[in-house]
Image (spheres, rainbow, N blue to C red):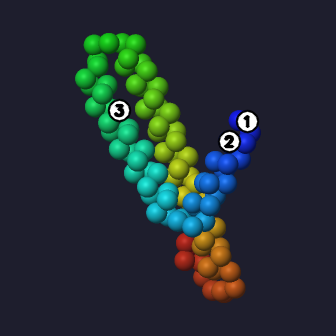
Amino acid sequence: MLNGIARGALWLDTWLQDHLGRPYNALLGVGLIIEIVHRGGEIMERITDPPRVAGLGFTIAMELALLIHQVGALSHHLERRRKLTRGGKTGPDPAGE
């Protein structure tokens, strides 16, 4: 069952990436940033309750890791598009590579 869910999620993520591209990545990134800011505010409210602060800290660390992953995925997507658009063109590389 878990394997089927994972395959479905991969298919949906690939479909959204192919059809929406950068807006899809931007939406995910903005959502993660909003959630991280919200969690940061919660830490300040709950500073007197160490177990809850530790849990919120772990949640923020996980969300930061997801944000880093999302930015990396966007980078791969942009590089793939750059190679496709550069395809048959000759001349200097605009990225300086």
Q: Secondary structure at mark 1?
A: loop
Q: Which mark is residue 19?
A: none
Q: Which labelled disc corresponds to residue 1?
A: 1
Task: Where is residue 20? Give x, y as percent.
Answer: 52, 65
Q: CA distance from mark 2 to mark 3?
A: 28 Å
Name the outermost residue toward the left.
45
Q: Is residue 81 left or right of residue 48?
A: right
**Crowd around label 1: few <14 · some 14–19 · many ≥20 (10 Å):** few
Q: Are marks 2 and 3 in contact (CB under 8 Å)?
A: no
Where is mark 3, residue-wise?
39
Q: Residue at x 32, y 12 (%)?
A: 49
Q: CA distance from mark 3 to mark 1?
A: 32 Å
- Amino acid beneath label 3: Arg
Of marks 2 and 3, the one in the foreground: 2
The residue under label 2 is which amino acid type? Ile
Residue positioned 46% across, 63% down in the render: 23
> Marks 3 and 1: which is nearer the front?
1
Secondary structure beneath dot 2 equals: helix
Q: Is residue 64 visible?
A: yes
Q: Which residue is mark 2?
A: 5
- Is 20 positioned to the left or the right of 88 in the image? left
Q: Is residue 34 above or below residue 62?
A: below
* Side of 96 relative to 26 (left or right): right
Instruction: Tell me the amino acid under the disc marked 1.
Output: Met
User: Label 2 vs label 1: CA separation?
Assistant: 6 Å
Give the mark nearest the N terminus, 2 or 3: 2
In primary-sequence order, the first of circles 3 and 1 is 1
* 46 sits left or right of 58 in the view: left
